[in-house]
Image (cartoon, grey):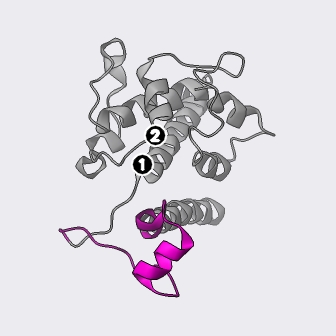
Amino acid sequence: MLSMKRDQDHFRGCLLGGAIGDALGWPVEFMRATEIKNQYGDRGITELVQNSDGKAEITDDTQMTLFTAEGLLRAETRGREEGICHPPSVVYYAYQRWLHTQGYPKNKDLDWIFDGWLIRTKQLFQKRAPGNTCISALLSRKQGTIEEPINNSPAIYPQEPLPILLLRLLKGLTLRMRLKGL
């Protein structure tokens, strides 16, 4: 029991640490070192930039990490309870939920997938400048595979390994590679 509690604490800590790092880094993400020094001083950015509500903001990377984690948790639960699951499909459905939070209409053919923890979190319904490659892949409404990826971009979901590793679902690179096909 202690091990499970420790694992949950580590899982939460990794997600929270990633979100804080994302919130700290997004204002300088596309700046050169000289621009950062000019704007923030020699030490660079050292404090979270707050919005008009006094809150630090996350980017689409943290949003996608959370939806990836939700998909993997659902897949793990279904696999344990039902004895059968296809994790890439479950994560694909999580990404479709995320797409909806970015202002895109629900995929009517998948109306049954729009439930869960994150889709009810209004703060995630903030468009955070997601990449065109990611959006176009999800808007294709196709679930890619390693053999037939939706596009050739090597880094559509660069943040997805964190939840995968935390859940210990990664056996070699098999699951990660299957998810890359999405």
Image position, residue 37 (x, y; %): 49, 81
Q: Amino acid at mark 2?
A: Gly
The N terminus: image quadrant: bottom right
Can residue 7 be seen from the camera position used here?
Answer: yes
Label 2 SS = loop
Q: Amino acid at mark 1?
A: Asp
Q: Which residue carries the number 1 mark? A: 60
Compared to residue 162, the image places residue 136 above or below, namely above
At horizontal 26% and vertical 42% (from top left) the residue drawn is: 120
The C terminus: image quadrant: top right
At horizontal 50% and vertical 48% (from top left) the residue drawn is: 65
Numbered badge on residue 131: 2
At horizontal 57% and vertical 49% (from top left) the residue drawn is: 159
Label 1 SS = helix
Image position, residue 93 (x, y; %): 45, 27
Write down the region rendered in magenta: 24-53
Image position, residue 163 (x, y; %): 59, 49
- Total numbered labels placed on residues in the image: 2
Q: Residue furthest top?
A: 109
Q: Residue furthest right?
A: 172
Residue 47: within the magenta? yes
Separation of marks 2 and 1 at Cα, in angstroms: 9 Å
Label pair 2/1, CB-CB below 8 angstroms: yes
